[in-house]
Amino acid sequence: MLIVKKFGGSSVANKERIFNVANRIADEYKKGNQVVVVLSAMGDTTDELLEKAYEINPDAPKREMDMLLACGEQTSVALMAMALSSMGIPAISLNAFQVAMHTSSKYSNARFKRIDTERINNELEARKVVIVTGFQGINKYDDLTTLGRGGSDTTAVALAAALRADACEIYTDVEGVYTADPRVVPKAHKIKEISYDEMLELATLGAKVLHNRSVELAKKYGVDLIVRSSLNNAEGTTVKEVASVESMLVSGVAVDKDAARIAIIGLKNEPGIAFKVFDLLAKHNINVDVILQSIGRDDTKDISFTVDQTQAKEAVALLKENKERLTIQKIEEDETVAKLSIVGAGMQSNAGVAAKMFEALYGVGVNIRMIATSEIRITVLIDIENVEVAMKAVHAAFLED
Ligand code: ADP
Ligand code: ASP
Ligand code: MG
């Protein structure tokens, strides 16, 4: 069997953890399996590198930023290969260039295009454990790129697909995917199986246990994912096409604190205005989520929407540049908001789910500022200070007896 195993930052944070992982890899290898390992940077390394860059140049060129951030993963793979070596297990570390893992050219948010498998296959044939850097790729200029925060999961899935691996295991610091972040909601419980679609919504809406692109790729290439702990042998969560258990009304609750709300006020109330606003944002690759339009005074209209905080400044600047053309009188930006979402495939055939969610929020006195829904999710925008109490109340309403 060919198995891809990915270990996150906390799982390789120090010497003890590195040897803990090395032992798990060695056990798999000794069973006669071919093992490809994907590693993240140790502990908080990526955050520390970001801070260092900020001290030198708060507006650093994105190319240099990726050059820097890619260092974290390179440290991990080299140390892991050394650890395995010391245990008598033949191992080789490879970075994105050596593999080669080709991505789009967009620094800090690159997407995989193609992965060469020859080098890895040769090393596996030679009975080596192959340890690959997560999170990084190379673009058409032969520059290093990174895949966005949490992107090592995506490296693992992309490799599993390219190598046609028999299994793809994501090892982390919790025992699997839970009905909510177990660090925020102590009553959250582990989910045995979850569909790609539900997992994709949860990951996109803030459940950082998996990078959302990794779920997208897993669905596209039919890679079953197992999420489990690197610290014990508890059975984890399987992410696959259709979970065999009957569709849950609500499978999970997620929170995204990195949202910003932008309000544009006093627009002319005429056809084409919304189109012009969102077309402008789309052309600059700014992702808009929850949208609310309301009629203001004097037959004007106001539009509020959310974007990721990292894109808020750019969005506001664009709107300012186009203020006249878009007939905007005033622009407001607010980062003290959070998105709270419930996700569940069973929602599509059940009335009253939204009402029940709103009732739970009413019960703890949390005001809803905006609402968005799809077939399998409901998202509300709330004040960031209410996140914990709101999350616990909504979790209790749907996921606790
Ligand atoms: P890694 O470094 O292994 O990639 P991450 O920190 O990226 O780990 O992801 C694991 C963390 O995700 C957990 O520690 C947990 O706090 C958080 N998390 C958020 N939502 C969920 C959820 N629904 N289920 C499990 N963990 C979650
Ligand atoms: N080291 C990167 C990050 O911290 C990638 C990852 O951990 O998946 O975002
Ligand atoms: Mg992660």
Image: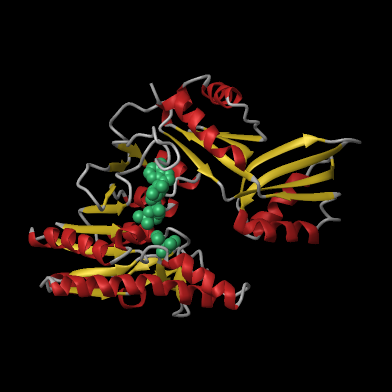
Q: Residue furthest left?
A: 31
**Colour pattern of the rendering:** secondary structure
List x then y, in percent, for residue 217: 38, 53
Q: What residue do we see at 48% from left, 47% from top?
A: 204
Q: Is residue 261 left or right of residue 227?
A: right
Viewer-nearest residue: 391 or 321:
391
Quadrant showing the N terminus: bottom left
Instruction: Give the image quadrant in which the ligand numbered 2 is located.
Output: bottom left
Q: Is residue 92 left or right of residue 262?
A: left
List x then y, in percent, for residue 153: 36, 57
| Residue 250 against residue 19 in the figure, above or below | above
Viewer-nearest residue: 131 or 349:
131
| Residue 289 against residue 37 in the figure, above or below | above
Q: Residue furthest right?
A: 298
Q: Quadrant of residue 7?
A: bottom left
Whether residue 270 can be seen here:
yes
How many labels, in total? 0
| Residue 341 against residue 65 in the figure, above or below | above
Quadrant showing the C terminus: top left
Viewer-nearest residue: 50 or 204:
50
List x then y, in percent, for residue 103: 43, 68
Q: What residue do we see at 45% from left, 42% from top?
A: 202
Viewer-nearest residue: 386 or 179:
386
Whether residue 8 can be seen here:
no
| Residue 14 against residue 326 in the figure, above or below | below
List x then y, in percent, for residue 142: 44, 80
Q: What residue do we see at 51% from left, 23% from top?
A: 353
Q: In which quarter of the image is residue 240?
A: top left
Q: In this view, does 93 lie to the left or right of 335?
A: left
